Image (spheres, rainbow, N blue to C red):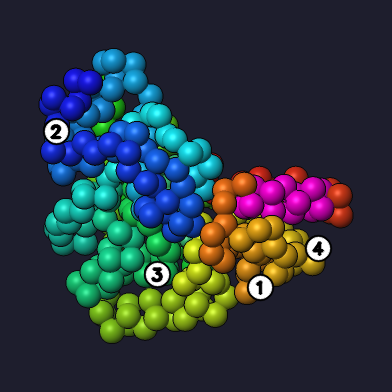
């Protein structure tokens, strides 16, 4: 493979992906590439585009259920792209930056606007891709531009062209390399208090330390998937090692040794019953590889 000749030091083979996902479930990536810079990422993407090779992007693996035993497409992990620079209220940051670390750093710098995302795991790139957030705000609200890597190299998209929506963005299908956020100067102590309040609320209502991929289903219009699942009696329901969280019914947790099949069977049981009871077809929020 050309890639092995070009980048022997960023290519690994037969890498177990379960260890890299928050569910702790996953097969093996036959080829696993971890660029150290955006320039390396651009060359990797250019090579794949040139050879017509389909590839996958891995961020923090916190929104994924990997059911395949073997991922044959190359997996490009952006976890090493973490550079951050500040220019007044503008924060330029690479896609592999862990979101939690970004939230903490901005708060310390007295830059407000993303403390609402406290407690959401994963990377900035994954958060941008699905416009992560919650009842206090979404990442898309503070983005001024996003830099993507495509066949032609680096492209910068202004926020107004990205169409951020509920758990969705116009970035799907692209490779996000970096973004610029526009925050607001504020008192660091006040930001820390708001961040603490969001975290405390999340810890009370979500099983943050269990192995999961966050909310499994998208909220149907005007309803909460978790409320429907709870009302249908699923809290604590199990298939093998997979269990509906007793704390938040939209979370399925790996209680230890769960297989992707256990999780998928539980998902199907939930969907069937919610369709039967409420005539609502739940759509997945997590992604399945
Ligand atoms: C305990 C827990 C709590 C959570 N709470 C929330 C919450 O409150 N709100 C919320 O919105 N989400 C929540 N999530 C879900 C998840 O953390 C977010 O969706 C997160 O933003 C996913 O980022 P990631 O880097 O882990 O993406 P991954 O899981 O690695 O990838 C998800 C998708 O994004 C793509 N992707 C990732 N990075 C890039 C990139 N740079 N360029 C192109 N594509 C990319 C991947 O290919 C994949 O398609 C939670 C998850 C857990 C485990």
The x and y percentages for residue 73 are 38, 29
- For marks 4 and 1, give the one nearer the viewer: 1
- For marks 3 and 1, give the one nearer the viewer: 1
Q: State which tag comes first along the sequence, 2 or 4.
A: 2
Image: magenta residue range: 262-275
- In the picture of the structure, the residue carrying the numbered disc 3 is 118
Q: Is mark 3 within 8 Å of ligand 1?
A: no
Q: CA distance from mark 3 to mark 1?
A: 22 Å
Q: Residue placed at 21% from the left, 57% from the top? A: 91
| Circle on res. 8 | 2
Q: Secondary structure at mark 2?
A: loop
Q: State which tag comes first along the sequence, 2 or 1.
A: 2
Q: Is residue 172 visible?
A: yes
Q: Quadrant of residue 196?
A: bottom left
Q: Is residue 23 left or right of residue 253?
A: left
On screen, 25 above or below 152? below
Q: CA distance from mark 2 to mark 3?
A: 37 Å
- In the picture of the structure, the residue carrying the numbered disc 4 is 232
| Circle on res. 246 | 1
Q: CA distance from mark 4 to mark 1?
A: 13 Å
Q: State which tag comes first along the sequence, 3 or 4.
A: 3
Q: Quadrant of residue 194?
A: bottom left
Q: Is residue 148 visible?
A: no
The x and y percentages for residue 223 are 71, 58
Q: CA distance from mark 2 to mark 4?
A: 52 Å
The x and y percentages for residue 30 are 34, 34
The x and y percentages for residue 126 are 39, 49
109 drawn magenta: no
């Amino acid at each position: 493979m050309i890639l092995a000749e070009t980048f022997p030091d960023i290519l690994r083979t037969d890498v177990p992906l379960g260890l890299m996902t928050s569910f702790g479930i996953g097969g093996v990536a036959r080829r696993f590439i971890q660029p150290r810079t955006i320039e390396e990422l651009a060359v990797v993407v250019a090579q794949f585009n040139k050879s017509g090779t389909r590839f996958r992007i891995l961020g923090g693996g916190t929104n994924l259920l990997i059911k395949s035993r073997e991922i044959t497409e190359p997996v490009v992990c952006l976890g090493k792209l973490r550079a951050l620079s500040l220019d007044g209220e503008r924060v330029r940051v690479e896609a592999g930056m862990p979101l939690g670390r970004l939230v903490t750093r901005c708060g310390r710098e007295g830059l407000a606007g993303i403390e609402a995302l406290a407690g959401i795991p994963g990377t900035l790139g994954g958060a941008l891709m699905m416009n992560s957030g919650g009842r206090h705000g979404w990442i898309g609200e503070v983005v001024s531009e996003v830099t993507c890597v495509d066949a032609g190299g680096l492209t910068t998209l202004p926020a107004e062209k990205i169409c951020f929506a509920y758990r969705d963005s116009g970035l799907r299908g692209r490779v996000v390399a970096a973004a610029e956020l526009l925050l607001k100067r504020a008192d660091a102590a006040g930001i820390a208090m708001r961040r603490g309040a969001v975290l405390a609320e999340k810890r009370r209502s979500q099983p943050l330390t269990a192995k999961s991929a966050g909310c499994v289903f998208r909220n149907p219009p005007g309803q909460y998937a978790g409320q429907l699942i709870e009302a249908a009696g699923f809290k604590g329901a199990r298939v093998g090692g997979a269990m509906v969280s007793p704390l938040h019914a939209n979370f399925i947790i790996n209680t230890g040794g769960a297989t992707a099949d256990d999780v998928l069977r539980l998902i199907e049981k939930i969907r069937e019953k919610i369709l039967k009871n409420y005539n609502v077809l739940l759509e997945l929020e997590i992604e399945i590889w």
